[in-house]
Amino acid sequence: MSEVATAVGLAVEGLEVAYGPVTVVRDLTLNVEPGEVVALVGANGAGKTTTLSAIMGLVPAKAGAIRLGDRSIAGFRPERVARAGIALVPEGRHLFPAMTVEENLKLGTIGRRSDDGLAEDRAWVEELFPAVRDFSGRRAGDLSGGQQQQVAIARALLARPDVLLLDEPSLGLAPKTVESVFEALTEIRRRGVTVLLVEQRAQLAIGFCDRTYVMAAGELRLTLTPKDAGDSARIVAAYFGS
Amino acid sequence: MSNVIQYIIDGIALGAVYALAAVGIALIFGVLRLVNFAYGELITIAAYVLAVTSNWWLPLSLLAAVASSVALAVLTDRVAFKRLREAPPATTLVATFALSFALEAVWRLVFGVNGRSADVLGALNTTAISGAIDVRWVTIVEVVVGAALLSAIAIFLRRSTIGLQMRAAASDIRTARTLGVRADRVILSAFVLSGVLAAVVAMLLTAGSPLVTPTLGLEVTTFALVGVVVGGMDNLVTATLGGFVVGFVNAVLGDALGADLRVFLSSFTYLAVILVLLLRPGGLFASRRATGAERV
Ligand SMILES: Nc1ncnc2c1ncn2[C@@H]1O[C@H](COP(=O)(O)OP(=O)(O)OP(=O)(O)O)[C@@H](O)[C@H]1O
Ligand SMILES: [Mg+2]
């Protein structure tokens, strides 16, 4: 909280991703300015997770540019993307279930560019997510879904990333827990971390984020701001087909 | 009674050796999902190096053995396995078979078919305790070294940062990489460790019987692999236990069967394995793994 790092932005331009012969993301351009929180919403199968995976280097991009600040990271392997300053909280959390919460957090620090400030970062995430402190000796797989989500976000933050990618952090959580995740996001934003958030609850995202991209069938269709929160329901519904 | 104690002592000793080989195999499987049939060649090369350097100063000879198996482990990965990272498991398995046979041919060409004597630790092949039961020094060393090395590996995996990364990679390499775990380094560490283990196995085996043949490592690996499969391939602890059990059974059968039946030793061991897998298809220790234990 104390130090305000210089925020770094993320830019994706003309991204194309295919699984075998099937192109699932095409000509996708999005921009997250330094310190912004931007959402990516869309129906199931729209290509949101694929977009994050491509940024993270988990799936190869067929075309397009990916820039972290002014550095091109397209074609980097995931470990290199992580070490360049991007952290991913994946869909389904993906903690190491047989390891303790503490060990999971320790793994979160592997991608840090420097161990300076680790103790402060640790104190900060513990304040943000009490479960991290309360259950540090427990097997991560034994925690509740909400607690696991807290650990997953804490683990990502301990890398002290410039950019945090979150894939449906509220999925399967009780409303109260969703609220606490978004409260944490407020703190994360205040710290100057740039956030790209994939979220099913479009209304929630549009109201909370600086900008919300609506994605359908692998393409961006619409960009919304909090001003649109009022009448966006109809527009979004059209793209979600519901 | 003393017979039974004798069997148990011999069983524990051979079990310890096979457990070490099993860890070497399971470590590689953990991080790469590669069933490395060529693991035995790491044991063989270390044994041959012991033979060739048997007139050297002992520590140097042992060190040379370790260096050779580590070098071969890393080389096989660089030359063969690295290109097959994305290949289906059947392909990589066949590749490890091919590599194993190719290396065996190399041993025949270079060292001859008749075998060499690696009498480096022969001093251990003497009686420590005699009487109702008969214990050689090598038996004691096998148990002590086995236990010490297995504990050291357990501590390494639990406490060290690279050990933590190896466990993470074994559990979920994709997620591990997104956290910054360098896949290359973890894989290299696994190959280096498996090479070290192979060298120790070679030392213990040649201490007991110094004859080194081109198929020395292959025989051990076949049994250890059986143990790993019986124990459960995807869990380091149970895979190690499986290796131990197979070594134990092997030694006990070897003691219990008369000389005329001993030629069927491997048949009996395989029979025992088939029985186990029929009764417990998931491996001997399947129930414990159902709780989602980590693989390494
Ligand atoms: N590994 C894969 N191999 C082949 N096709 C895939 C793979 N992963 C995703 N797809 C396909 O790519 C498309 C986009 O999937 P993606 O997971 O990116 O969607 P999403 O927007 O994250 O959906 P959801 O909201 O359900 O998480 C889908 O049609 C999906 O079936
Ligand atoms: Mg998704």
Image (cartoon, helix red, strand yellow):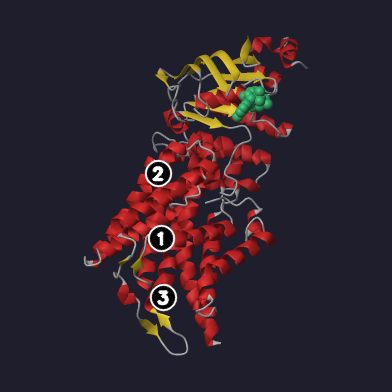
Q: Nearer the viewer, mark 1 or mark 3?
A: 1
Q: Chain of mark 2?
A: B
Q: Toward the viewer: B75 or A159?
A: B75
- Residue at image x 34%, y 57%? B108
Which label number is shown at residue B140? 3
In this view, B47 is above or below B256: above
Measured Cα–Cα span from mark 1 to mark 2? 21 Å
Residue beneath label 2, please? Answer: B77
Image side of residue B238 versus residue B191, left or right: right
Measured Cα–Cα span from mark 1 to mark 3? 26 Å
Label 2: element kind: helix
Q: Toward the viewer: A11 or A115?
A: A11
Measured Cα–Cα span from mark 3 to mark 2? 34 Å
Residue beneath label 1, please? Answer: B215
Image side of residue B116 versus residue A90, left or right: left
Q: Are marks 1 and 2 on the same chain?
A: yes
Image quadrant occupied by the N terminus of chain B: bottom right
| Marks 1,3: beta carbons within 8 A | no
- Residue at image x 55%, y 45%? B171
Percent position of residue A81, x then y: 45, 28
Tell me the kind of residue under disc 1. Thr
| Marks 3,2: beta carbons within 8 A | no
In this view, B228 is above or below A32: below
